[in-house]
Amino acid sequence: MSAGGSNVLLTPDQTAERLAIPKRTLMDSYQRWKLRHVRVGKHIRFRERDVESWIDSQTVEP
């Protein structure tokens, strides 16, 4: 499925830090961006491998 990353679940804070964006931007946009996520009760988590895969899919070739 994904070339890198693991099944580790990242919090929104950790995910935003990894993407170098404000948490608010992540929380406002993750569904529109189609960034895969996991619901744990009322909490949102992001699998590390899904974040890495999403980053790869956003890469623009020159």
Image (cartoon, rainbow, N blue to C red):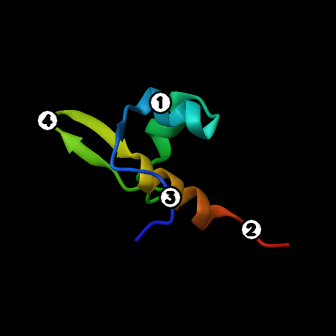
Task: Classify 46 as above or below 14.
Answer: below
Camera-side residue of 32 and 46: 46
Q: Which mark is residue 14?
A: 1
The reply to whether the C-beta atoms of the residues labelled 3 and 1 are less than 8 Å apart is no
Q: How many marks?
A: 4
Front-lying residue, 29 or 43: 43
- The disc labelled 3 sits on which kind of residue? Gly
Q: Which mark is residue 61?
A: none
Give, as a three-letter code, the residue at label 2. Answer: Val
Label 1: element kind: helix
Identify the residue at image location x=78%, y=72%. Answer: 61
Query: Which quadrant is home to the C terminus?
Result: bottom right
Badge 3: residue crowd in 10 Å (few <14, some 14–19, many ≥20):
few
Quadrant of the snapshot with the N terminus:
bottom left
Residue at image mark 4: 41
The residue carrying pointer 2 sits among few (fewer than 14), some (14 to 19) or many (20 or more) residues within 10 Å by Cα, namely few
Mark 4, secondary structure of its residue:
loop
Q: Earlier in the sequence, mark 4 or mark 3?
A: 3
- N-terminal of the pair, mark 4 or mark 1, is 1
At 52% from the left and 59% from the top, the residue drawn is 54
Outermost residue to the left: 41
Q: What is the spatial separation of the Cα atoms under label 4 and label 3, in whole angstroms?
A: 27 Å
Q: Nearer the viewer, mark 4 or mark 3?
A: 3
Q: Position of residue 33 (x, y in %)?
A: 50, 57
* Mark 1 crowd level (few <14, some 14–19, many ≥20, 10 Å Cα): some
Say the numbered circle drawn on residue 4. 3
